[in-house]
Amino acid sequence: MRVLFIGDVVGKPGRKALKMWLPELRVRYAPDLVIANGENAAGGFGLTKDVYHELLDLGVDVLTSGNHIWDKKEFVKEMDSFDRVLRPVNFPEGVPGRGWMIVDVKGTLVAVISLQGRIFMECIDCPFRCCDSLLKVIGEEVKVKIVDFHAEATAEKSLLGFYLAGRVTAVLGTHTHVQTCDERIIDGYTGYITDVGMTGPVNSSIGMDYAEVLERMIYHIPKKFKVAKGPVMLNGVFLKVDETTGACTHIERIYLKEEG
């Protein structure tokens, strides 16, 4: 099985990058499953119904997310009706949406799990214990399990990679919007990268207009951020997976950048 995972899509520039390069990536890698983190896809914060459908129309099969999935209130109200978007599974019971799903990929069942960290973030349920419980629910019959770990601290991400090694196909970090170069396969089984990176504007502060961010950084006065303009990039990873065992046999970073 061949899986393409695309890093956090930021606003209209991120959607532009998807439109530009996803057809090319489909030719190059022939993915059976395309996953993207979409929590920043609508104006840099959250999702809307229209953007959700736009991303699916562009060729994304499953959308994962993180802390910003709650930013568009109208979308949150309707979240239960959108069957291909995930919010982090370790939010307390009773919040809208679902945190994991199983998709049938050419006859092979694949579990996609959205998980959020706690260090420097909301103190929600423990991602380690939550994933332990969830893996029992999913069961051994589902061999392929892809985890999007949306977390701030690199230490927390790496520890989850080691913690889940041999039990899930991949632990793919998101949230920091800066691609790391530590992709590897842990214990010959679990594909890992600390952060897949971002799909959005190149000349920005993690997707936002850097002039606005600088003003807030220097003067400490609240400032509304807006998505940057200009050339775009696409960050992602490509995985090859042994369907019979669920092991990741290959992980490859993808970094495409528009000139300008």
Image (cartoon, helix red, strand yellow):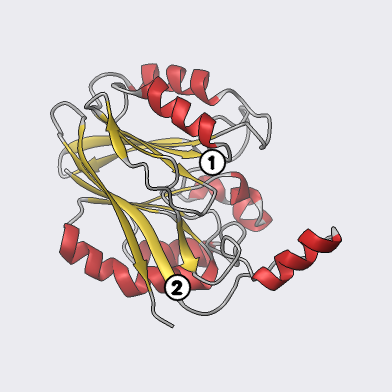
Q: Is residue 202 left or right of residue 138?
A: right
Image point (20%, 51%), residue name: 32
Determine whether 117 is above or below 165 in the image: below
Label drawn at residue 97: 1
Which quarter shows the C terminus?
A: bottom left
Q: Nearer the viewer, residue 60 or 158?
A: 158
Identify residue type, mark 2. Val
Name the one closer to the observer, 219 or 151: 219
The answer to whether residue 128 is seen in the rendering is yes
| Residue 40 numbered tag | none
Q: Is residue 149 above or below residue 20?
A: above
Q: Amino acid at mark 1?
A: Gly
The residue shown at (41%, 49%) is: 196
Q: Position of residue 241 (x, y in %)?
A: 19, 38
Mark nearer the viewer, 1 or 2:
2
Apparent side of residue 100 relative to residue 66 in the rendered image (left or right): left
Q: Pointer 2: what residue?
A: 232
Residue furthest to the bottom: 260
Sequence-wise, the earlier of marks 1 and 2 is: 1
Asked where in the image residue 28 lies, by quadrant, the reply is bottom left
Q: CA distance from mark 1 to mark 2?
A: 30 Å
Expressed as whole percent of the image width and height from the top left, the position of residue 18 reads 37, 68
Secondary structure at numbered mark 1:
loop
Seen at 49% across and 73% down, the residue is 13
Q: Could you classify mark 2 by the number of other residues whose Cα lies within 10 Å: few (under 14), some (14-19), or many (20 or more)?
A: many
Q: Residues within 10 Å of mark 1 (few under 14, many from 20)?
A: some
Dividing the image into 4 quarters, which one contains the N terminus? top left
